[in-house]
Amino acid sequence: MAARSKDTIMEQITVFLADDHAIFREGLRLLLQADESIKVVGEASNGHQAVAEVARLMPNVVLMDLAMPLLNGIEATRRITLETPSVKVLVLSSYSDDQHVQQALDAGASGYVMKETASEELLQAIREARNGNAFFSPPIAGCLLRRWKIRESQTTATPALTDRQKDVVQLIAEGYSNKQMAVLLCISVKTVEKHRQSLMDKLNIHQVAILTRYAVSQRLVEAESYNHPAGDAVVRVDGRYANRMTAESPI
C-alpha cells in the first residue's frame, strides 16, 4: 500500500492557478484537490506574478484567466510559453469570442476551456494538456472552425510593440500615471516617458482615448469605455473604474 501511495504522489499533475478573483481560485483549488492525481502548487492574482511564480515552481499545467490586472492573460501566456516551454498553459475563461480564442492560441496556449464547463471536462483538459495534447470546450472548437475559415481575410498588419511597450499601453489604458507605472514596472519615470513616446510614434497615436481603444482592440486590456456624466472618459477594468483624459487631450 505504501508503494502504491508513493507512486500516486509521483504521478500527480502539478497545476498553477492564475486568476484575479480569490473566491474563484479557492473554489477551483478545492475542486482540483479532490482529485488525487492533481496537486495545486501555486496561485497568482495578476499576470506579472503568474509569470514569475511559474518560472520558480515549474508546474505541469497553468490554468490562466485572461482578464487580469498589470499584465493580461494573453501576454502572461505568451511569456510563460516562451520562457518555460515545458509548462502547458490552459486558458480558463468566460470569453468565447473568436478574437480571444485566436490570440490565446497565438500566444502558445495548449487549450481553451470555458469557466462554466463541467468539472469532469476541466479535469480531462488538464490531463490532455499535461500529455501534450490540445483540448477545447465544444463552443470553442466551433469558434476555431469559423476563425480558421476567415483568418486570412481578417488578418491586418499592426506595428509590433516590445514587451515593455505593451506593459505601458495596458497601464495607460488602466488609468495609471507615469509615476505609478514607474513603480509598478520597477523603472524610472524618464524610462516610462521614453517608452510612451516611442510607442506613440510607432502607432502614430497621440491621444489617451485613442490609445485606450487600441489597447482594447488588441486585447491588451479588458475594458468597457463610456462617457462619464461629468464629461470625463472612464475606463472599467476588471471592475475597477479610473478617470482618464478626454479624446481631445494629448498623452
Image (tube, rainbow, N blue to C red):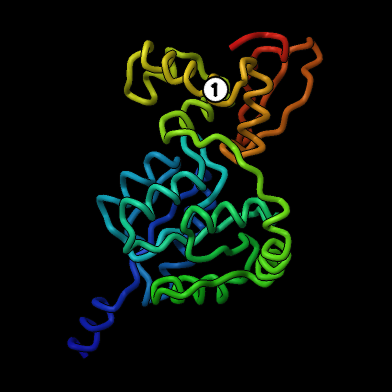
SS state under label 1: helix
Is residue 51 positioned above or below 40 on the image? above
Q: Residue drawn 70% across and 21% down?
A: 234
List x then y, in percent, for residue 124.
51, 77
List x then y, in percent, for residue 106.
52, 55
Q: Quadrant of the N terminus?
A: bottom left
Q: Residue drawn 39% across and 47% down?
A: 79
Between 36 and 152, the one nearer to me in the picture: 152
Is residue 69 toward the left or the right of residue 139 in the image? left
Between 69 and 153, the one nearer to me in the picture: 153
Residue 97 figure quarter: bottom right
List x then y, in percent, for residue 76.
44, 46
Is residue 88 positioned above or below 185 on the image? below
**Numbered disc total:** 1
Extreme residue in the right direction: 229
Residue 118 figure quarter: bottom right
The residue identified by callout 1 is: 172
Is residue 59 positioned above or below 208 on the image? below
Extreme residue in the left direction: 3
List x then y, in percent, for residue 88.
40, 63
Label 1 Cα crowd, 10 Å radius (few <14 / some 14-19 / many 20+): many
Q: Quadrant of the C terminus?
A: top right
Residue 187 figure quarter: top left
Between 54 and 195, the one nearer to me in the picture: 195
Q: Residue drawn 67% across and 64% down?
A: 148
The amino acid type, in three-letter code, at marker 1 is: Ile
